[in-house]
Image (cartoon, grey):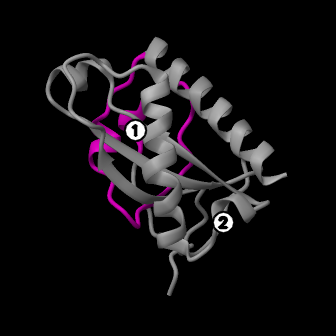
Amino acid sequence: MAAVRGHRRVAVGLLALATILVAGCDTAGPASLHVGDCLDRPDVVGDFGELQPKPCDEPHGAEVFFVGDLPAATAYPEPDAVSAFITDACIPAYQAYTGVDLMTQDDMDIGWLPPSEDDWAAGSRRVVCYATPYEEGRQTTGSIRRQ
């Protein structure tokens, strides 16, 4: 079951990435996020500039567990390159942050916010990965960070 869920995560993530690329996004919000920030779950389509950290002891739908840069390249990366980066960087970072293997989780999933094409052209390679309850709309209270 874990392998099937993993493929589903990648497919959902690629769909989200494609939607973001088509819709465009203002990365002012994601640019201000840091590991450990809790926030409302980002919409797949929308103005990501509105993302605001909130205390983790308040109900929230997402928690940032990794911030990193895509490898430098001259052209904006294809969805497969972003997906490979997520697999190589974000999935292991989830386990390091939580102490739990993501693939064994039935109630948590991950999402990510890549740089927009405009941000890429301006030199940003920043990707924000966040954990979110698997059930859309569900919120949690407290941090998932390993103590």
Q: Percent position (x, y) of residue 84?
A: 48, 37
* Front position in the image: 70 or 60: 70
Residue 133 among those drawn in magenta: no
Residue at point 42% right, 52% down? 89
Reading the image, the residue beneath label 1 is 50
Q: CA distance from mark 1 to mark 2?
A: 20 Å
The residue positioned farthest toward the left in the image shown: 122
Taking the image as drawn, is residue 56 in sight?
no
Figure quadrant of residue 53: bottom left
Q: Quadrant of residue 14?
A: top right
Amino acid, disc 1:
Glu
Tell me the magenta residue range. Answer: 24-51
- The residue wearing badge 2 is 140
Q: Check if residue 39 falls in the magenta segment.
A: yes
Q: Position of residue 49 (x, y in %)?
A: 35, 35
Q: Is residue 138 above or below residue 79?
A: below
Q: Position of residue 8 (x, y in %)?
A: 73, 37
Label 1 or label 2, whichever lies nearer to me, is 2
Packing grade of label 2 (10 A; few <14, some 14-19, many >=20) is some
The x, y position of residue 83, in whole percent, is 50, 34
- In the displayed structure, 64 sits above or below 19; it is below
Identified at 53% across, 41% down, the residue is 42
